């Protein structure tokens, strides 16, 4: 590698380490939110040039990057990312509502309440009409009580319930807790499938909602597909970067675009000149946990 390439990588590393703020990416189905975060981090480090031996001898500066609001591996949609000092803004930035498009399947229940689990029950659904579904949605609107799924990011003795379940350990259901649904509407009904548009507050589980709707209709139901279209002020259509845009330059532009979404009290100060010097890259692992639900974990690394 020639001197010009080294200078270019050094400049990219400096720019990467100077990034601070909050932006959003488009999470596809398949990876967990944590796996996606690692993939993003690895792409950025590779673009900047992994620390070479001569860089490591210099003063190190940590690259902090994290996500807020865990999405299930089977779900897709907007995932909000904090980088640099933006990792400290995630909880405040994500205090607003979330919006989802969910496709439910009537007549089939699973242990995970979605299509990734084992079928635990099957019931007839032929008698259910569009009017039946629309007629019960009001019961799931406003401030309601909801029992979270056993397969979830909620924890017992410091371990996720989903992890304990996968080990085959006995797990008791968590008690029902208050959650908020701002709006819910039926977008499409083509038996056995029905599509919902849901806007809700933190700690709400779409999988539990779909399961409860099935029970209310004297049948059963599970989530077939789930897409998060809004998380706080970030929307899938306007703000979420697809994977081919996970570059240092594209993220810098996205941070600038998303800066208008920051509450005034959270606007980041510009870094001091000495904070933008060329440094080696390393990664610091931190986990910040909230007590809310499916999409309230804040993970930084």
Image: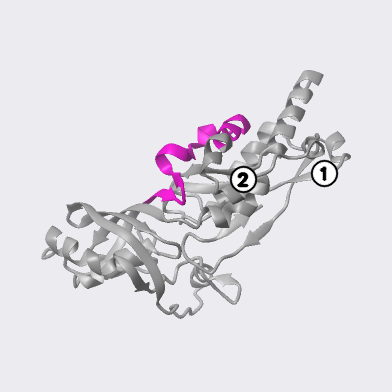
For this rendering, which residue is in front, 212 or 165?
212
Q: Which residue is mark 1?
A: 60
Q: Tell me if residue 98 can be seen.
A: yes
User: Residue 105 in the image: x percent, y percent?
Assistant: 26, 59
SS class of the residue under badge 1? strand
CA neighbours of label 2 inside 10 A, class few (<14), some (14 to 19), many (20+):
some
User: Residue 121 in the image: x percent, y percent?
Assistant: 27, 71
* Residue drawn 54% across the image and 60% down it: 297
For this rendering, which residue is in front, 27 or 123?
27
Magenta span includes 196: no
In-image side of 38 versus 215 (left or right): right
In-image side of 54 versus 106 (left or right): right
Give the position of the N terminus as an image quadrant. top right
CA neighbours of label 1 inside 10 A, class few (<14), some (14 to 19), many (20+):
some
User: Residue 286 in the image: x percent, y percent?
Assistant: 68, 58
Q: Is residue 105 above or below residue 248?
A: below
Q: Is residue 174 above or below residue 193?
A: below
Q: How far is mark 2 from mark 1, CA to CA?
A: 26 Å
Give the mark nearer the N terminus: 2 vs 1.
1
Could you say which disc has been placed on residue 139 in the image?
none
User: Residue 21 in the image: x percent, y percent?
Assistant: 61, 43
Q: Which residues are magenta?
A: 227-254
* Residue drawn 60% across the image and 51% down it: 265
Closer to the observer: label 2 or label 1? 2
SS class of the residue under badge 2? loop
Q: Tell me if residue 129 can be seen.
A: no
Could you say which disc has been placed on residue 267 in the image?
2
Magenta span includes 228: yes
Q: Quadrant of residue 134?
A: bottom left
In-image side of 189 versus 291 (left or right): left
């Amino acid at each position: 590698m020639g001197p010009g390439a080294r200078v270019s990588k050094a400049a990219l590393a400096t720019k990467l380490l100077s990034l601070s703020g909050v932006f959003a990416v488009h999470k596809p189905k398949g990876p967990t939110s944590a796996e996606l975060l690692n993939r993003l981090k690895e792409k950025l480090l590779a673009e900047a040039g992994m620390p070479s031996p001569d860089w490591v001898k210099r003063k190190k500066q940590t690259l902090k990057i994290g996500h807020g609001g865990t999405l299930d591996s089977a779900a897709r949609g907007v995932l909000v990312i904090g980088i640099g000092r933006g990792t400290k803004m995630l909880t405040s930035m994500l205090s607003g509502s979330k919006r989802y498009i969910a496709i439910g399947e009537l007549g089939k229940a699973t242990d995970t309440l979605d299509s990734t689990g084992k079928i635990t029950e099957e019931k007839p659904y032929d008698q259910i009409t569009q009017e039946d579904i629309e007629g019960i949605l009001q019961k799931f609107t406003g401030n309601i009580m909801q029992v979270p799924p056993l397969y979830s990011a909620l924890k017992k003795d410091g371990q996720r319930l989903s992890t304990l379940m996968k080990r085959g350990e006995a797990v008791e259901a968590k008690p029902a807790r208050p959650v908020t649904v701002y709006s819910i509407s039926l977008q499409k009904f083509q038996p056995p499938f029905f599509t919902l548009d849901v806007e809700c507050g933190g700690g709400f589980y779409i999988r539990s909602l779909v399961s409860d709707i099935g029970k209310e209709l004297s049948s059963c139901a599970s989530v077939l597909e789930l897409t998060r279209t809004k998380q706080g002020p970030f929307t899938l259509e306007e703000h979420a970067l697809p994977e081919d845009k996970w570059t240092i330059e594209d993220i810098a532009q996205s941070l600038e675009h998303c800066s208008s979404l920051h509450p005034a009290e959270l606007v980041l100060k510009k870094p001091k000149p000495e904070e933008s010097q060329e440094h080696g890259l390393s990664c610091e692992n931190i986990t910040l946990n909230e007590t809310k639900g499916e999409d309230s974990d804040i993970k930084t690394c």
